Amino acid sequence: MKQYKVLDYGIVRLVDFMGGDSAVVQSARVSFGKGITNDERDQKLVFFLMANGHETPFEHSVFKFHIKCPIFVARQWFRHRMASYNEISGRYTEMVEEFCLPEQLRTQKTKNYRYNELSAELNETLRQKIQAHYNLSYELYQELLEGGVAKEHARIVLPLSLYTQFYWTINSRSLMNFIKLRTEEHAQYEIRQFAHVIDDIFREKMPWTNAAFHKYVIAGEKWSDE
């Protein structure tokens, strides 16, 4: 099973997949009592559906991912509610000492929604302080566990940069909404890196749908009956 590395400790794995471009065609043509015909006509149908906003046939292809990402990324991820999630529990599992430490810290967004980078010297100074904070927080976490404190209480000292894991099951219609929003330039950099990997997997499994999605949804082109 192929595993994609993201950020420092993050991973994306496609655990299971059902459907594909043919499932989209099949579910769309059932309205007329028909099924799959030939590649050229089937591909054109996928593009037509996408261009004209006929989205329900895309719900018949389903992806199941294993995701490992920082908690602050997961909290943004879970806002996409048209999906199923199961996350590792810090109540029952001892959390691993894995924290997200950005290579380059950014300033707050400006009025034109652009980030600026901190100077190299300040960036390195603050990164060292952040790393020291991570070390102390995990040392305290271990101290609490060794003192007999329950995992569900000990975890409260750990920062949002800690890595979590979850399984994510989502149909391709909702997946496209996630990719559209989370690859957009105003989305936070860290979640964009995961979204781009998800998009690559989506392209591999559903090449017609992905191509149509990028043409008509991302690029905003209009349909023409070529």
Image: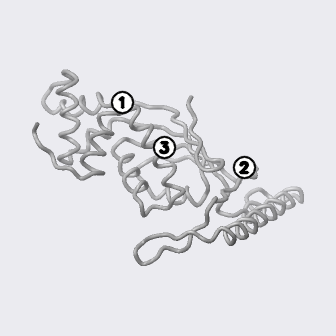
Q: Quadrant of the C terminus?
A: top left
Depth-wise, is mark 3 or mark 1 nearer the camera? 3
Q: Is residue 44 left or right of residue 82?
A: left
Q: Quadrant of residue 55?
A: top left
What element does badge 3 sit on? helix
Cα distance between the residues tagged 3 and 1: 20 Å
The residue singled out by tag 1 in the image is 19
Residue linked to disc 2: 92
Amino acid type assigned to the residue bearing label 2 in the image: Tyr
Horizontal and vertical percent for residue 151? 76, 56
Residue 61, image x and y in percent?
36, 35
Is 153 displayed left or right of 169 in the figure?
Answer: right
Asked if 170 appears above or below 148 in the picture, the reply is above
Identify the residue shown where x is 42% and y is 72%: 113
What type is the residue that disc 3 sits on? Val
Badge 2 marks a residue whose secondary structure is: loop
| Mark drawn on residue 197 | 3
Residue 204 in picture, x, y percent from top left: 41, 32
